[in-house]
Amino acid sequence: MAPAIEIHSEKLNLKIIEYIQVLGSCWRCAIRFTRERKPEAYQQKNLDLKQEPEEKVQKTSPCVICLGLVQDQFIKECITDEISQRVIESDYDSPTFSCTVSLPVAIMLREQAVWFLVTEKFPELLSTIFKIDHVTSLKDVWKFVFSEALELKLKKKLEYSSSSFQIQVNVLYQDEISECGALVDMCPEKFKHRYKQTRVYREGIFTRNAAHSVLSGISSLNFKKHYTLKVPNVGTHYGVVQCSHTSIHIAGRYQKFSRKLCQTPWLIEGEKHMDTSIQELICKHLEPFFKTQSVKFSSSGREDVDVRTLGLGRPFAIELLDPHRTLFTQVEITQVQIIINKSTDAIQIRDLQLVTKEQLSVLKEGEEEKSKIYRALCVTLDGSTLTAEDLDRINGTTELVLMQKTPLRVKNCIH
């Protein structure tokens, strides 16, 4: 959150806006430099602003700052249709959404160039508490402009930061690499190792963090030596629209009746050792219900393949990653539990329910604190019959050392 700063006079603000528009900026980007943060200010034109400079300079060219992203003549209904259609096709049922937009790094260079020009033209802006970081974010303005249309088309409510359903819109710029080359000229040592380690910097050589580290301390003289603001030949275009939902967690207890069933898929050198597992018997029904293709299974401890789990059962939890279905009732969850129990004789589950991530800590605590009851068939080495006194003595034993060999499955995994 930007700190409170002194508000300049309306007269000065209008001069700043007119000057930035003459540089080739759209009216929305121009008022961003006056720290205007009200959404309604960007959703329709302010009739008090002079629009002639934009009409003359921007007839065929994109805005010199946003590259046409929030410029009236480049905003078309089909753009909103295209984004919303991709989201609708992803088939998430969340009633709310948060939207983020990834911008070309070249826009940071263009904002910096305009900032230096404006602060030199209007020394009143050269305040120690007013920095370029206080200019209203282009990402916020994009949301102001498109949010209402997206809400209507998606039939979902926009929540700026709290929704579990995230929409990531990627904005691309054809001349990104050529323009960002100026960053290398400004600070060659910053990018020298990046060119040699392209595998490490998978997001590209020119990231926003890298650009910010160069621009945050650069002088106007050094900046202008390597970069000149020009009206762009092409504007931005939309790339991939990525949708995702935060994980949801389901927990319950399972009883295991088979002595030939492992808890999770048993893989040895990449090959499956058993036909199925407890995880697979449960998740093959949960995955289609929640419309997810990836899960993480965890439990309060585990048992060997040839050991049954009886009594109340062992607590388990399943993290459903990126679920498309998130609206359901406990009645529906119980119905899934019934389906799972009817599908196999090897296991039975109970108490299936939605839990929070914080509640999962109980599983780990249970590994250390829970008590277990073991029952075993015992025989005497000489075949003699035990007397009542012998049984009482055995049952009265409170400390017993078990001599157990390493389970075969662990040996195989080691080798």
Image (tube, rainbow, N blue to C red):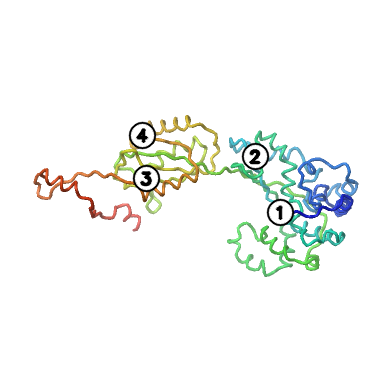
Vertical position of residue 139 compared to residue 158: above or below: below
Residue designated by label 2: 86
Q: Earlier in the sequence, mark 2 or mark 1?
A: 2
Which three-letter amino acid code belongs to the residue tagged 3? Gln
Judged from the image, the secondary structure of the residue bearing numbered disc 2 is helix
Judged from the image, the secondary structure of the residue bearing numbered disc 1 is loop
Q: Are marks 4 and 1 in contact (CB under 8 Å)?
A: no
Judged from the image, the secondary structure of the residue bearing numbered disc 3 is loop
Q: Earlier in the sequence, mark 2 or mark 3?
A: 2
Which of the two residues, 274 or 1, is positioned nearer the viewer here?
Answer: 1
Residue designated by label 4: 344
Residue designated by label 1: 104
Question: Residue at the location (65% across, 35% down)?
Answer: 156
Which three-letter amino acid code belongs to the residue tagged 4? Thr
Residue designated by label 3: 263
Q: Earlier in the sequence, mark 4 or mark 1?
A: 1
Q: Are marks 3 and 1 in contact (CB under 8 Å)?
A: no
Gap in angstroms between the C-alphas marked 2 and 3? 38 Å
